[in-house]
Image: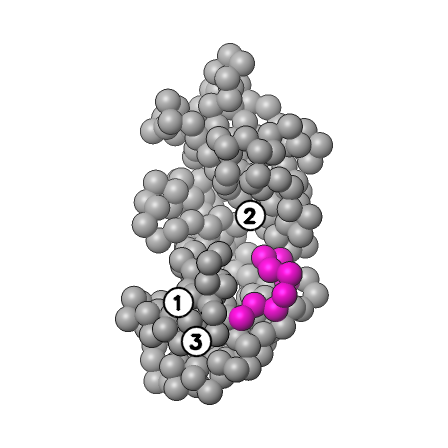
Amino acid sequence: MFGDYYGKLLAQLALDYNCAPEDLEGKENVVTVSRLNEGRRSYTREAPFLQMATTGGNTVVMADERLHAFLGEFVKGVEGHRLFELGKLSELDAELKKYGYRMAPTHHMFLPCRDVAPQGEWRVEWFDENGIRPFYGDERFPNAISYPEPCPARPDILAVAAFDGGTVMGMAGCSEDAPHWQQIGIDVLPPYRSMGLGTCLVTMLKNRIIEMGDVPFYGTAAANIRSQNIALNSGFRPAWVETEAHPVGE
């Protein structure tokens, strides 16, 4: 299962990072020109000032051409994964600040690797794009759906919520970040955590996305162990790590 999705990942990252799929598994780090390619994952309206990704070997850095001279030396002779260590990120952050940008947190990204059946007997309800609308602006669900309002570039496609009577216990939702690429997010309310509910909802949604013929993927922060465990228990495994630059003040 993972191998099939991994091949699709290389094709998608090639669009996202303006490179060839083989560049993502090369021996040397690669620097490319920032560009908004058709079919990319949509996170910015303008071409990113800098973003970089690794699948565990080398790293591909897509950046504004003003950074290329610096980046050529920055990546030279460095193992790709080490570019994500604090020392190198701090060095990169210092250079970015000259242009009014700063480094954002890293994202650890997961792809499906095995079939998992959801465990639990909670009452659940499914919501399509229209059914999700009443939940926008609800501060309880900043990860499951776009918050505080819909994002046309990454529309929420589907969500599943568990209920305790009339009370929502938790919700998992997915946004279509690129054509047929559905990113899953999960929110479980504090009284219902550590019960396996998050894993159950993510597993249900992951399985439904696969049935739809789309690619489910999951992302979380480096130190969010609970979220990472949900991904692992739901049948995902680590596939790539990425980060980007944001304007200072955002």
Q: In the rendered view, would you say 237 is above or below 34?
A: above
Rendered position, 200 above or below 179: above
Q: Residue furthest top?
A: 165
In three-dimensional space, the C-alpha distance between marks 2 and 1, rounded to whole angstroms, equals: 21 Å
Which of the two residues, 67 or 120, is positioned nearer the viewer here? Answer: 67
**x then y, percent, for residue 25:** 47, 74
2 is higher (above) or lower (below) than 62: above
Judged left or right of residue 175, residue 250 is left
Give the dominant element type of the magenta stretch: helix, strand or loop.
loop
Q: Mark 3 highlights which residue? A: 98
Residue 153 seen in this snapshot: yes
**Residue 240 coordinates in the image, percent (x, y):** 44, 61
Please give the label number shown on residue 233: none
Q: Which residue is mark 2?
A: 183
Classify 10 Å Cα crowding around label 3: few (below 14), some (14-19), many (20 and above).
Answer: few
* Residue 198 in which image quadrant: top left
Viewer-side label of 3, 2: 3
Residue drawn 46% across and 68% down? 101
Judged from the image, the secondary structure of the residue bearing numbered disc 3 is: helix
Q: Residue furthest left?
A: 87
Q: Which residue is mark 1?
A: 56
Amino acid under disc 3: Lys
Q: Bounds of the magenta span?
A: 40-49
Give the Cα distance between marks 1 and 3. 29 Å
Q: Amino acid at mark 2?
A: Gln
Q: Tell us which disc is closer to us: 1 or 3.
A: 3
- Is 155 situated left or right of 191 in this image? right
The residue shown at (47%, 20%) is 121
SS of the residue under disc 2: strand
Marks 1 and 3: CB-CB under 8 Å? no
| Label 1: which secondary element | loop
Earlier in the chain: of badge 3 and badge 2, it is: 3
